[in-house]
Image (tube, rainbow, N blue to C red):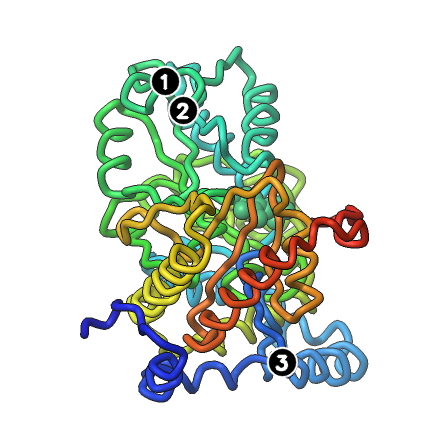
């Protein structure tokens, strides 16, 4: 049996869990008893050590040591220190990654910088089906570019190959599609973008911490992503931005705040950017939330992303196989082929919203993405094969019971 082959019975799942080389990782997270958490792609669980780390930051660094902590507790260095640690997970050598701000803000900085690095070009290529904030930010960055810009959308204006030419300044792509879970071929696409003379910006929101990414080896220009999904940094934890060494000296951060200054505490009148990655900082960072990211990186310390990826593929394969066996009429949107699949399984079903609500009531948390996608994320750091088996059974039960007939499950909440 290969590492990624799916077990064929619940008993086989239990055996597989006992043999799982990653099984000890589960204990590094707090997971409520009896809950099967398939939403770690939206908000990862709390690392067990985070509580004590937050308490230390609050009681010692903040309450006792006050402003001294900017130096004595290393607060000021956290964005680059945590950035370097996160860089390991995305294949970026030190000095190219920061933990700061939000994905939306970091994307804005990256697109704006890319436009500045390609002065003769006036087109940004993005994906029509991308997570909306990415498209909204493309609009905002184009509007403030200082010259007229145009947008071309993959999946609306044509395939990427048809949209690349010498007018394209940058291409913004999601490594994994937030809805379908489809994984893009980073090496192939990056090569095509570079052949057209454009820069590439990869959004790793749905892959960082669970799928390998080769920032340096693939010659990536920019990467952004959040830390509260598979990275488990906590609600609203700061995001990350990666900027290749070779671009840093010329790349301009449009949000030129004092934390990006070469000497923030010289209090100079004029802006002079830091010579390295810190030029992509803007202002004071949320230190408490930074500690959440630190705890999440501690929880993955020493873990090989390729091992996480192998287990993730086996988990999603098992779930898809069980769903196909139990509910052959359901449409699994996520590609069955491993090389095209992220770490989630999306199922299109017009009664998807009430089914997900009923599953939550039965202890399986997934989520729903309009118009009709039931989305289940499989985080290999803490999920067990037996959980996956049980989740498919509960999905089958809910559909068999036609839970959508109960109006209780159709009531929409603000966050789906
Ligand atoms: C989750 C996600 C975001 C989130 O952006 P925030 O600025 O953190 O709210 C952005 N892009 C993609 C593709 C995402 O999946």
- The quarter of the picture where residue 251 lies is top left
From mark 2 to mark 1, how far is it between C-alphas?
A: 5 Å
Q: Which residue is mark 3?
A: 34
SS for callout 3: loop
Q: Residue at x 51, y 46 (%)?
A: 279
Left or right of 319? Residue 103 is right
Q: Which mark is residue 158?
A: 1
Residue 404 in percent (x, y) is at 70, 49
Side (left or right) of 192 relative to 184: left
x and y percentages locating residue 196 in the rendered image: 25, 22
- Mark toward the start of the polypeptide (3 vs 1): 3
Tell me which residue sits at (68%, 75%) in the image.
69
Residue 91, percent from left and from top: 31, 58
**What residue sits right under mark 2 in the picture?**
154
**Residue 255 visible in the snapshot:** yes
- Local packing at callout 3 (Cα closer than 10 Å; few below 14, some 14-19, many 20+) is few
Mark 2 touches mark 1? (CB < 8 Å) = yes
What SS does tag 2 mark? strand
Residue 226 rendering spot, x and y as whole percentages: 54, 54
């Amino acid at each position: 049996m290969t590492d990624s082959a799916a077990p064929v019975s619940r008993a086989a799942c239990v055996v597989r869990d006992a043999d799982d080389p990653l099984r000890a990782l589960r204990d590094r997270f707090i997971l409520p008893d009896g809950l099967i958490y398939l939403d770690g792609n939206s908000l990862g669980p709390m690392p067990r050590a985070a509580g004590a780390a937050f308490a230390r930051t609050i009681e010692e660094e903040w309450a006792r040591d006050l402003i001294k902590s900017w130096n004595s507790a290393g607060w000021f260095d956290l964005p680059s220190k945590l950035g370097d640690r996160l860089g390991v997970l995305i294949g970026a050598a030190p000095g190219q990654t920061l933990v700061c701000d939000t994905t939306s803000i970091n994307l804005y900085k990256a697109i704006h910088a890319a436009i500045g690095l390609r002065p003769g070009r006036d087109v940004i290529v993005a994906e029509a089906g991308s997570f909306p904030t990415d498209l909204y930010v493309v609009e905002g960055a184009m509007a403030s570019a200082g010259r007229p810009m145009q947008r071309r959308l993959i999946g609306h204006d044509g395939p990427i190959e048809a949209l690349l030419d010498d007018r394209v300044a940058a291409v913004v792509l999601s490594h994994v599609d937030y809805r379908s879970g489809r994984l893009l071929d980073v090496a192939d696409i990056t090569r095509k973008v570079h052949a057209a003379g454009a820069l590439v910006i990869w959004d790793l929101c749905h892959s960082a911490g669970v799928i390998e990414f080769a920032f340096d080896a693939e010659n990536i220009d920019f990467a952004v992503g959040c830390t509260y999904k598979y990275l488990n940094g906590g609600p609203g934890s700061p995001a990350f931005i990666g900027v290749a060494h070779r671009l840093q000296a010329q790349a301009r951060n449009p949000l030129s705040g004092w934390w990006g200054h070469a000497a923030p505490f010289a209090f100079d009148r004029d802006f002079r950017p830091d010579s390295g990655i810190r030029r992509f900082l803007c202002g004071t960072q949320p230190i408490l939330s930074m500690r959440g990211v630190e705890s999440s990186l501690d929880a993955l310390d020493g873990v090989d992303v390729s091992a996480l990826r192998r287990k993730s593929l086996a988990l999603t394969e098992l779930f898809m196989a069980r769903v196909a066996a139990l509910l052959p009429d359901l449409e699994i949107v996520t590609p069955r082929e491993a090389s095209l699949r992220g770490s989630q399984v999306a199922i299109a079903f017009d009664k998807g919203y009430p089914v997900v609500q009923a599953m939550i009531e039965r202890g399986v948390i997934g989520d729903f993405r309009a118009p009709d996608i039931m989305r289940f994320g499989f985080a290999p750091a803490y999920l067990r094969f037996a959980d996956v088996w049980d989740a498919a059974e509960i999905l089958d039960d809910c559909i068999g019971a036609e839970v959508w007939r109960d109006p209780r499950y159709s009531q929409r909440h603000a966050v789906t």
